[in-house]
Image: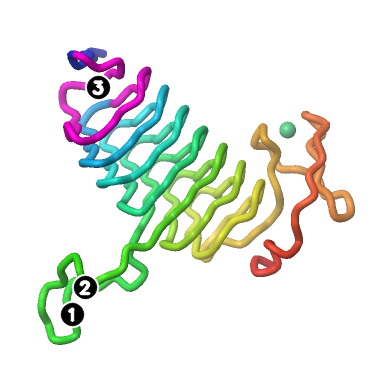
């Protein structure tokens, strides 16, 4: 595998990747084949950006983030540190997608509203998932492969399906926890988590 370090940069980028000179890349970050990173994007330290990943303009990504092959991270997305994005995940940003206006003209930048997505610290998004705009995914939440996430996911929440439904809670280690009354317990880590009920009602 051949990688070339760009001059004056402490990150590593494959020669086929296209990195805007107006993007900021943290030290120790590795960027693989055919990645595109747009202007204004900010990527933290020690991230791994897999083959064919697209990172749109002004996207903000924290440290120690792993983005697997062919993921699409559109404008409006923020990924906190330690987030995992599986292969072919799509983070969308247009809640009402139309190419044209009601009178048939091609839509311009002023004809639609950018939706935002926030993925909080340590959360994981499984392969092939789609995240709709205006969604927050909580800390250490886990999105099952192929899920379509249409609303917020609580901290440590495990959601699956289309539309994604809350089916349990996962530990920091990623394992599904066992329910004990109102709390959830990881037998491997011996850690107990008590969800905040108010935030979760909409998923039940
Ligand atoms: Zn655990």
- Residue 164 in percent (x, y) is at 55, 61
Q: Residue under circle 3?
A: 13
Q: Secondary structure at mark 2?
A: helix
The residue drawn where x is 53% and y is 64% is 151
Q: Farthest residue in the bottom direction?
A: 103
Q: Are marks 1 and 3 in contact (CB under 8 Å)?
A: no
Q: Earlier in the sequence, mark 1 or mark 3?
A: 3
Q: Give me the residue at 58% from left, 56% from top.
A: 160
Does residue 26 show up magenta in the picture?
A: yes
Q: Is residue 185 left or right of residue 43?
A: right
Please give the range of residues in magenta.
8-31
Please tell me the numbered disc located at residue 111.
2
Q: Residues within 10 Å of mark 3 (few under 14, many from 20)?
A: many
What is the number of the mark on residue 101? 1
Residue plotted at (42% across, 46% down): 78
* x and y, in percent, of residue 146 in the image: 47, 53
Quadrant location, the C terminus: bottom right
Q: Is residue 184 above or below residue 202?
A: above
Position of residue 196 relative to residue 140, above or below, is: below
Q: Say few, some or many: other residues with alpha carbon within 10 Å of mark 2 (under 14 / 14 to 19 / 20 or more).
A: few
Front disc: 3 or 2? 2
Q: Secondary structure at mark 1?
A: loop
Mark before the other along the chain sequence, 1 or 2? 1
CA gap between label 1 and label 3 equals: 40 Å
Whether the residues at callouts 1 and 2 have beta carbons within 8 Å, the answer is yes
Residue at the left extreme of this rendering? 105
């Amino acid at each position: 595998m051949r990688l070339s370090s760009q001059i004056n940069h402490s990150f590593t980028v494959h020669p086929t990747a296209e990195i805007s000179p107006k993007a900021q890349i943290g030290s120790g970050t590795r960027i693989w084949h055919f990645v595109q990173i747009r202007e204004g994007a900010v990527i933290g330290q020690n991230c791994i950006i897999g083959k064919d990943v697209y990172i749109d303009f002004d996207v903000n990504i924290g440290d120690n983030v792993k983005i697997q092959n062919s993921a699409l991270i559109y404008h409006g997305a923020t990924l906190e540190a330690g987030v995992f994005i599986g292969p072919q995940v799509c983070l969308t940003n247009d809640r009402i997608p139309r190419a044209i206006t009601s009178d048939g003209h091609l839509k311009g930048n002023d004809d639609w509203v950018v939706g935002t997505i926030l993925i909080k610290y340590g959360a994981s998004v499984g392969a092939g998932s789609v995240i709709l705009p205006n969604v927050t995914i909580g800390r250490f939440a886990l999105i099952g492969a192929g899920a379509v996430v249409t609303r917020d996911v609580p901290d440590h929440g495990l959601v699956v399906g289309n539309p994604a439904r809350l089916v349990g809670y996962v530990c920091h280690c990623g394992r599904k926890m066992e329910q004990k009354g109102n709390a959830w317990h990881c037998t491997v880590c011996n850690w107990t988590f008590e969800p905040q009920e108010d935030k979760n009602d909409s998923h039940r």
